[in-house]
Amino acid sequence: MIRAVVVAICFVPLLGVAVQSQRRPPEPPGYRMEDYRAPTPATLAGARVVETNEAENLWRSGAAFVDVLPDIPRPANLPPGTIWREKMRMNIPGCIWLPDTGYGTIAAETESYLRHGLERIANGDHARLLVFYCRRDCWMSWNAARRALTMGYENVAWYPEGTDGWAAFGLPLQEAKPSPANGE
C-alpha cells in the first residue's frame, strides 16, 4: 500500500507534464509575430488542418504543397576564402519552396514573391488545394496559410507536422532549392 502511494506521488507531476504538452495555444487574431518555433494552434480558421496520413493522400492525389521554411543564405560579411556550406533542405517531392514567406510581417517584395509562387503552383486556379507546411511547431506555415486565405485562395490546408512528421512516417524526401523569384 505504501509503495502504491509513493509510486502515485512520483507519477502525478508527470501526468501534469503530459496534459500540458497536449495543450495548444489559441489562434491569435492576426499573424504570429515572434517566437516562430513554438507550439501551434490545433486550428486555422478558414483552412483545413491535416495530419500526416491525410497529407500523404493529398500528395499522392496531386495537391500542391508549399514549404515556407526560411532559407539561410551565405552571410554577406564572411571573409574572402571562407568556406560556406549551404544547409541542405530535404523536402516533400514536388513541392514549391517559398522561403521567408511565413513571417508575421513581410516586405512587399516578399509578399509579391509569395503571390507569384502561389499563382505558379496553382496555375492561376484559386480553388486548387494548397497544402502549407514547414516543420513541426513552426508558426510560419500557419502564417503563410492564413496569408493565402487573405489572397483569395479558397482551398487551403495546413500541415502542422511538416517535414518532421513526413520523415517520421518514412515518406520520401528530396533535396530542395528555393523557388526563384522570377519563376524560372
Image (cartoon, rainbow, N blue to C red):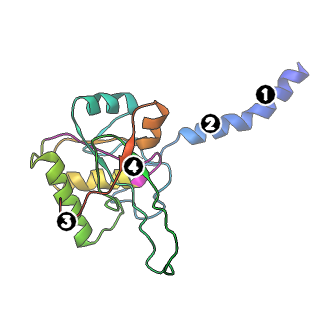
Q: Position of residue 42 (x, y in %)?
A: 41, 41
Q: Amino acid at mark 1?
A: Ala
Q: Disc 4 to disc 3, how far (Cα)? A: 20 Å
Q: Which residue is mark 4?
A: 134
Q: CA distance from mark 4 to mark 1?
A: 39 Å
Q: Which residues are magenta?
A: 128-139
Q: Quadrant of the C terminus?
A: bottom left
Residue at 33% of width from left, 30% of height from top?
56
Q: Is residue 88 left or right of residue 178?
A: right
Which of the numbered marks, if any, corresponds to residue 156? none
* Residue picked out by circle 2: 18
- The answer to whether residue 153 shows anywhere in this view is no
Q: Residue at x 84, y 25 (%)?
A: 5
Mark nearer the viewer, 1 or 3 = 3
Pick whichever of labels 1 and 3 is earlier in the sequence: 1
Q: Which residue is mark 1?
A: 8
The residue carrying pointer 1 sits among few (fewer than 14), some (14 to 19) or many (20 or more) residues within 10 Å by Cα, namely few
Q: Secondary structure at mark 2?
A: helix
